[in-house]
Every structure is written in structure tokens, then in C-alpha cells.
Amino acid sequence: METSLSSSLKAWQIAEKCKRDHNQIDPMINFFIDRNVRYKDVLNTHLYFDVQDIYQQVEKLKSQAYEHLPLAFVPVLIKDNICTENIPTTCASKILEDYRPPYSATVIERLKQAGAIIFGKLNCDEFAMGSSNENSAYGPVLNPWDKEYVPGGSSGGSAAAVSAGLCPIALGSDTGGSIRQPASYCGILGYKPSYGLVSRFGLIAFASSLDQIGPMTTDALDAALLSDVIMGHDPKDSTSLKSGSPSWFQTLKELKESEINLKGTTIGVVSEFFAAGIDSEVNACLQENIKKLSELGATIKNVSLKSLKNSISTYYVIATAEASANLARYDGIRFGFRADSHEGKKSLKEMYANTRTQGFGDEVKRRIFLGTYVLSSGYKDAYYTKATRMRQVIKDDFLAAFSAVDFLVGPTAPTTAFKLGEKNKDPVSMYLNDIYTIAVNLAGLPALSLPCGINSLGLPIGMQFIGKPGDDFQILKGAYVYEQATGWHEHHKPKL
Amino acid sequence: MSRPQGGMNTTNLSSNEQPRQSQFKAVIGLEVHCQLNTETKLFCGCPTQFGELPNHNTCPICLGLPGVLPVLNTKAVDFGIRLALAVGARLQPTSVFARKQYFYPDLPKGYQITQYDLPYAVGGGISLSDGKFIALTRIHFEEDAGKNIHGDRVSYVDLNRAGIPLLEIVTEPCIHTPEHAGEYLKRLRSIVRHLEISDGNLDEGSFRCDVNISVQGIHDKELGTRCEIKNLNSFKNIERAIQYEILRQIDLIEDGKKIVQETLLYDPALGRTQAMRSKEEAKDYRYFPDPDLKPLIISPERIERVKTNLAELPEAMANRFSESYQITLLDADQLTHEKELALFFEEVVAKVKKEISPKIVANWILSEYLREHNEKKWDFKKPVITAQNMADLLNLMAEGVISGKIAKMVFNEMVDTQADPSVIVKKKGLVQITDTSIIREAIATILANNSGQVGEYLSGKEKLFGFFVGEIMKVSKGKYNPALVNQILKELLNDQEKTLQAQK
């Protein structure tokens, strides 16, 4: 019995086991509860974890017909910027310290309908703003591979939890790389879907035109399974695409042996991804893996994305502009934190100022200032308007590249995980970490990061696939083929 | 159509102001915020019902809770298309929702979703009775804010109104008199009510007007510094406020003082405008397209669909009334100003006997009925006198049961008691007397008692005929059939004349 329980079980395996034999349910749930209890404080992954709540969900599901539910009894952890009804949702911010939403995000509703057990809420950078998870008001998450290192961000809690086997699958969100970069740093698969494939209803907005919820898993099959559950048009989100739910899991499972290769696939290598700034070990690892893709039958082609050099500045204008408006609602009036006024009567303005000064962390404030500035009269044309034009240029650049290739390959980040405290004093060097991921959000493309190597320090290296808009399956299949051929993702786990 | 002259209420300038004003020209632009009467709010499913308990009509979306997203109400868009079609505005194939950012407790998200540089409709306008055309700059959609309620020590926020759909209708700065401003607003209100897209209720704030106003010398090329007057909640106050503000600005200019650009409130009790804030803060709303909403695409098919179901507009209705009911355009214009009144008129016309012409119906409605309506502040939607009762009253007249004079008495009784006219006539014994022998006897008595006047009449003072009629009606309390009175009086006077001649 004990041997069948393992932290490396896939989501689909857990669901199958529990559906096949109901005696498996309790041991399975208890195994994961134990594992969460054991590691959550060591890694500081969790912002909410309640065993009673888990048992209640399990008992409720047992009383229902769960035989056909794809995620029956699968423990899922949720990034804390996704609303869960009556369960604290803080965005890792002091300003939402005790906030419990009166409704659940569409993705949460869909997970529950699929039989998933919401195991808890995960730490992240405050309002998903950051690349190291050091911007959480509740302390940084530690990298399971080496606790002196950051797990990446902003979905650092999700990446660390999946990497440490606290749950097979987790939800993250990606605005400029927040799923892919931590996935890369923690050696898991992180997938950011095409913009509009996953409903944003209930995702606490950072930058609405860039945000996208996505799966964080250990392999492509589980990413496909989770996608099947959470995707599909949502009438509550006006930017949600009018497409039905996919059935990628089944499609991948049913691939014949002869189809598990990259024959007939043209993969573009973005030369700008290998320019100055890339770590030499990351570079070497990626070159080796590109060779491997070629051996799997792919045609490798060099492509250039000239506008890529403008992506960071473009992103930090658009994302902060949107954020400055999205975060205006945290004003102490209706919900969340309100600054005390011990010094007697305060004006409304002072209440706003004190609440927001005390409630938000430095990085959030920095971005609100930036966003307010780039939209201000007299500056808007030079910054915001210009950035929206550059965004279109970047999109067009990608589309041009895709006329010759099926998907693009490159590193997810220029380096592997860095040490805690190494970059958080220098915002610009932190921002540069997202250089390979950011343009993808500006163009609304699908992309994923999958583990493909280990550096000399024993830290994982991630490889990024970037797909055509809407052609998400292509990159998932690419990842699946790579996994089947190399088995890399199974052989390398952090030692906790 | 050519508009009938007059017809709308006007505020006349006192005569001694006229020459002073003639040196100056006022330039006025109006911004109307018109609440659409959709069942649900602009971006969520909350009801728009007025008068609920505070914060009753709210949900996570209109409360602006974290994570929520707006979804555009398609009904509101159709309503907006109706107005654009009605005033001849050009519907834009693509328009964009933008965020207008400012902090205020009644603004839950910290921004208002509105339309900024790309509104859904531009141009168009409304003609006034003297032929003046009030050109529109634009019409756009936006969501309403909530309401702050200030207590003694604390303030409260009511978000029932937050998210209710509004149309903002902006005129060109092409208005120069308070009268034109007033008539434009009345006509616009009439149109939105005919289209059934808004209650146009000034008291409940579903039709709100801000006035931009500046004054310049009649030969000046440049516009003067403008002030904005807010919070105007009746047509009368709007005209008065404009009038006051024009004179205030002229006074300042004549005294060589500068006009400060500021926001003013009109105090109806004092009859003057006052600065709302002592110092105008520099406002920067930091507009940008709302990334949560896709651009609004209005297809030609959609416009066609709305067009085919478009209600008859007041102007067209007035023309039709004038032609098919043979009433003056002026009467038709007044009858069609309120849709309910126009329908009431048509209903009464359909129910009266053919002896009662539409002209008579129009006269009754525009004089007796409308006078009572205005005096007692009736609601057109809840008629105190039904069309059936109104028609019955006129029919009693046609049948000769009561005279016109009695009819007016009965009408007043109907206003007080809401009873059927026939019941009132019976109960009060107001049935017209048509018994010729009774009338003849009464007239004979009156002539006998006024032999002096009879003599004068017979010697050529024919005006005295009216005197006799008056005396007869006095005696009969108006109940004698006037036609019979006329006829018998003539007969008896003729008899007297014959007798006189025979005596000669």
C-alpha cells in the first residue's frame, strides 16, 4: 500500500487510483496532508492551509458521483492571487491581510467541478509583482533545490510546492514570466496559455491585458489535463476566447509510438535569446537540447526578433499603467486594510495615503508610481501611447517569425535561480531577468518552460517553447515528445 | 418640419437688462447625464431599481472587489443606438471604453468606465421651435458612481447607483440664451422618454445637466473663460442659473475683473450660483483604454434591427397629429411632448362620439386637463383621470346631457373624486334641462321682470341678448340646454316684437 503513495504521482494517476478503489482516497489525501505539513513552513510556500477544510471537501466529494471527474481527489494548490470563496485571498499583500472573497474565480469553480481538492493558497510576490518571491508581505518562498536560493517569481510558491511534491499540480499566473521563470528555477513545467484561453474572472488583476492563469505541473500530460479542466469560454470575462474546452490530455495519451517525435516540425532558435547576458552554463545546456530536438526529427532554423530589445521597457510601461488603475480600488473604504487614525480626525486624503503607504510593499508602490507617471497628461504620448505602438511591432515581429517555424525555442531565463537578497536591491537587474519571457505576454502567445538540465551548482535549467497564437497544443506536444525521449523530468528531483 | 412658434415656456429677461446684455454674447454648452432604464447595470447583473435600501443592489462587480471583470450590457447599447438614431448622430463602427481615474469613496474601482476619445456616436442634433438647431458633439456610454451620505461624525457610501448605465450627451458650445438651453433640454428629455430608454426624471437624478458657460463681447473672436454649473435639478432652475451666471460674468467683465474658471453650484433658494470649491484642483484623469473590455463593435445589422423597432419620435408624432386630427401644429407639439399625454389624447379621441372633434378633445386636454396636471403635479404614468372617463365626459356633452359649462364643473369633481362623470352628473343633479316648457316659462318670467331691457332690445340694442342669456343661466345654474335657451329666447323676443308692432 505504502509503495503506491509517492510525491511523484501524476494528477491523472491520483485521480485514477482514487476512482478505481475508494479505499485509496483517505491514505492518498493523508499522504499529501502530511507532506504539506512537513514542508510548508520549511519552504514558506503556504499562506493558507486548513486540514478540516480539506477533509470537508473530500467527504463532500465522496458523497457525489465522482467516477467521471478528471481530477477526482487530486490535491491542487492555488496561487494566492486567485479568489476562493470565504477562504483568505491576500495576493501576499498586507492590504488584503484578512480579506475573504465572497465568490470564487471561474478556474476554482471548474477545478471543483472536476473533483479537485483545493489544498490551500500559495505564497507569491505581492500582487504578482516580482521575479524572486521576495516581495511577499509574508516572507520569501525558498527554492526546494537549495534553500539559499529564490524559487523565482511571482508564482514562486506554486513552483516550489510542485517541485517539492506537495501537490502534483498547482495554478500560477503569468504577466511577464511569472509562471515560466519560477518553473525554470524549480525544475518543473510551467505553461502560460494564449491570452484569453483561461478565464481571468477572479484572478486579482495586475496587468489585465497581460495576465493569464496557467498550469504548473511536473509534466506535459498533467499540464494538458489541467488545461482541459480550466479552459473554455467564460461569459464573465469579456476577453475570454470563444472556444470550447480542449481534450489535449486524451490526444496526447492516444499518440502512437510513431507519432511521438518532432518529424515535420520546424523549430526556430531566436538568436536574440542567446546574446549578451546569458549565463554560459545555461547557453551550453540549451545548445545541447536544441541538438536533441533536432535528433527527435525537428528542423532547426535561426530566426531573429529585432524588437525584442524593446520588450522590457514596453512591458514596464504597459504593465505598470494598467496596474496603477487596477490597484486603485485598495483604498481602505470597502474591504481590506485601513490605516488606523490614532491621531484623531483624519481627512479622506490622509486615510487614502496612509492606507496605501502602509498596506502596499515597496515594489507595488514603485510600479503604481511608474504607471501613474506614464499615464499622466503631458507624458502619456511619450510613454503609454508609444509603448502600445511598440507592443504591436513586437506582435508583428513574432507573427513574421512564425511564418517560417512552428514554434520557437530558447532559454526561459538568462540564469538559473539566484541567491536570496542578491538582486532585490536593484530593481532593474531584477526586471532584466524576465527578458526572455516578457515579450510573449505582450504578444499574447502561448509558452511553456520545461526542465532540461542542471548546472554545476545543482540548480535546474529551463527551456522555453513559444507557440503561435492559439496553437498551444503544438508546444505541449513538443514538451511531451521531449519528456518521452529524455525522461529528464522524472530523473531529477530536489533533495529535501 | 418647421417648428411651431412659441409653445415652450420661456424666461424673459427683465427689460432693463436687455441693452446691457446686447453688448455681450453668452456661449453655452450642455452636458446631460441620462440614466438608461435598463433592468440591470451596465457591467453586471444587479437591478437598477430606484429607492432600495442602501447597498442592496450590489454585487462583487459593482462593489469593485478584487478579481472581478465587467461584461457590457447589450440592452444598454441598443438603447444608446436608439438615441443616436433619433437625433441623427453618426454611430461609430468601433468605439472604446476607457478608465477615468480618480479617488473618491463613491467610485469603487478608483476609476469610472466611460468612453473617451472614441465615443459610440458623434454629431447629430435637435431642432427648436424657432428653427434653431442645437448641434451635438458626441454621445457616449458610461457607468454612474455611487452616492456619499454625510452624517454628523461619519460618512456613508451607498453603491446602489454605482454601475447604472448612463448616456452622456454633449452639445457644441452653440447655445446663447437660457431659453434655448431650456427648450433643448425639454426636447431631449421628451425624446428619451418617447424612446423609452430613460425616465428622464430630474428629481430622482435620472436626467442631470451640467452647464458650461462663458461670456464674451459681441465682437470678440475668442471665447471667454468658462465656468461649469453643476447640480441643476429642474428646468426652471437651469434657465435661472444660466441667466444669473450670464449677468454675473457680465458684471465681472464690466468691473474689469477676471473670471476664474471654476465649478459652481446653483442655490435655488438664493437664486444665485456659488463656487463649489474655493480652489480648482488640477485634474488629470489619466484616461486609457480599459483592457478588461474589448472595443465595442456596432454592426450595420444591429443598427438596422434597432431602427425597425424605433418608437415614433415627438416631432414625427406632432406632424401626424396635426395632419390626421386637423389640429394646429402648436397644439400637436404640446400634446406630443410627453408620450403618455399623446397616447391619452389618442385614446380619448378613439372613444368619443363623432360629434366631438379631435380639436375639442385637444382643447380640453391642453387647457383643463393639463392645468390640473401641472397644478397637482400628476405623474403621466399614473393617470388620475382615465381616458374612458374623459371621453365619457365629452360624450355627455355631445349627447346634450350636460352643457359645456356644467362639463367643466363635472371635470373638477372628477379630479377631486376620480368618479365616473355620469355618476357625478346624476348625484349632483346636473343633468341638462331640455324640457322646453320649463325653459319657456323661466324665460318668460325673466323677460317680464326685465321689461325695461326688453324695450331697449326691441328698439335696437341687440347686445342685450347676451344679458338675457346670462340671467337665464344664473337662474338655471347652467343646467338649461344652451341651444334651447337661445332658440326659445329668440322666439319669445320675436313674439314680444310682434305684439309691439301689432299694438302700434
Image (cartoon, coloured by chain):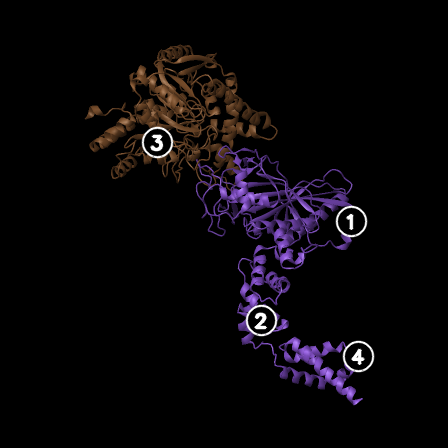
Chain colours: A brown, B purple
Label 1's element?
A: helix
Residues marked 4 and 1, same chain:
yes
Q: Quadrant for residue A5, please give it.
A: top left
Q: Which residue is mark 1?
A: B20
Mark pair 2, 4: CA separation: 37 Å
Which residue is found at the position 66% from the left and 75% from the top?
B483
Front position among marks 1 and 2: 2
Mark seen at residue A102: none
Badge 1 vs badge 2, beta-carbon distance below 8 Å: no
Label 3's element?
A: helix
Mark pair 2, 3: CA separation: 75 Å
Label 2's element?
A: helix
Q: Which residue is mark 4?
A: B460
Q: Which chain does the residue under circle 3 lie in?
A: A
Q: Which chain does the residue under circle 4 lie in?
A: B
Residues marked 1 and 2, same chain:
yes
Mark pair 4, 1: CA separation: 57 Å
Badge 2 vs badge 4, beta-carbon distance below 8 Å: no
